[in-house]
Amino acid sequence: VTRKRQSVRKAGAIQVVKLGGSLLEDAAMRAKALRSIARTQQDGTKMIVVHGGGKRIDALLGRLGIARKTHAGLRITDDETLEPVIAVLAGVVNKMLVSELGGLGILAAGIAGCDAQTITAEVHPPIDGIEFGHVGSVCGCNPSLLFAMIDRGILPVVASIAISAKGELLNVNADALAASVAVGARAAGLTFLTDVDGFLDANGRLVPRLAQAKVEELLAGGSVTGGMRPKLEAALGALRGGVDNVIIAGPRNHRTALAKRSGGTHLVAA
Ligand SMILES: Nc1ncnc2c1ncn2[C@@H]1O[C@H](COP(=O)(O)OP(=O)(O)O)[C@@H](O)[C@H]1O
Ligand SMILES: [Mg+2]
């Protein structure tokens, strides 16, 4: 008698976790976040980790004497910048996370979004006439490799690099990549682990719940700045793509956000 194997897609219990840049650079915060991820996985939730690594890239560019160029919050990635970007994201940061998860007893394997065409992107259009070079805007996610890994009990750790239709490597925003992974893998939830407790109001107070319409309103106005803007844009993309449990959480609420889906800012479709 052959029993049909339950597909992870049908189980519907995938959680996508995006690890932010500041968190990646703080060993104690990172260890705490990875322990939360490990425990959640060991409790039976299927996890996918997505990461960026902007600060680590800046440090290497500095050592190589390559100027850091940005425009509209995006890194201008010319030919000479692309190599260190790939080396840091798909190499240094990715393998650091894989090894630290390994130390917690988790079978993790690192890929970049380009592997098996998991994340496709197109060259980012210029802003104010400025070209970004090897920077992509995410088109979509093919979850085959992610599902194959999860089916074998392997936790995928995904670096924020995508591939174009022509086979070019593109540097993409990690929040956008995480949202695309969550939609493509039909994840039950998406959690952005960052360095603030969630979305803060003008008085610096945590906003526990944000409806989609309110997020749209906030983004249309100019008040959301810095890294919170791409995060809210990505959250909106996830909500529109059918991921109905999106949380922005910080160092104080990693564990409850992942295990109990409480704490931080909850972004909801209605
Ligand atoms: N309304 C807001 N609430 C919280 N953080 C905000 C807000 N507006 C801007 N920010 C900034 O966004 C940052 C988080 O984004 P970012 O630095 O890109 O982190 P990550 O590396 O996790 O993506 C916060 O540290 C804060 O400086
Ligand atoms: Mg960011």
Image (cartoon, helix red, strand yellow):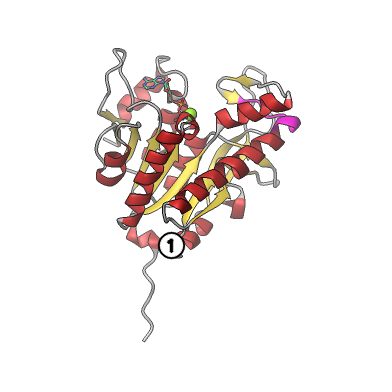
- Dot 1: within a 10 Å radius of its alpha carbon, few (fewer than 14), some, or many (20 or more) residues? some
| Highlighted range, magenta | 75-81
Viewport quadrant of the C terminus: top left
Q: Label 1 sits on what residue type?
A: Gly
Residue identifier under label 1: 153
- Residue 229 picture quarter: top left
The residue lying toward the viewer, choosing from 64 and 120, is: 64
Q: Which residue in the rendered view is the most extreme toward the bottom? A: 1
Q: Which residue in the rendered view is the most extreme toward the top? A: 203
Helix, strand or loop at label 1? It is loop
- Residue 33 picture quarter: top left
Viewport quadrant of the N terminus: bottom left
Marker count (numbered): 1
Q: Is residue 95 left or right of residue 61?
A: left
Question: Picture coordinates of residue 210 (x, y %)?
Answer: 28, 28
Residue 46 lies within the magenta run: no
Residue 77 lies within the magenta run: yes
The residue lying toward the viewer, choosing from 182 and 156, is: 156
- Residue 17 picture quarter: top left
Question: Picture coordinates of residue 252 (x, y %)?
Answer: 30, 31
Q: Is residue 242 visible?
A: no
The residue lying toward the viewer, choosing from 185 and 148, is: 148
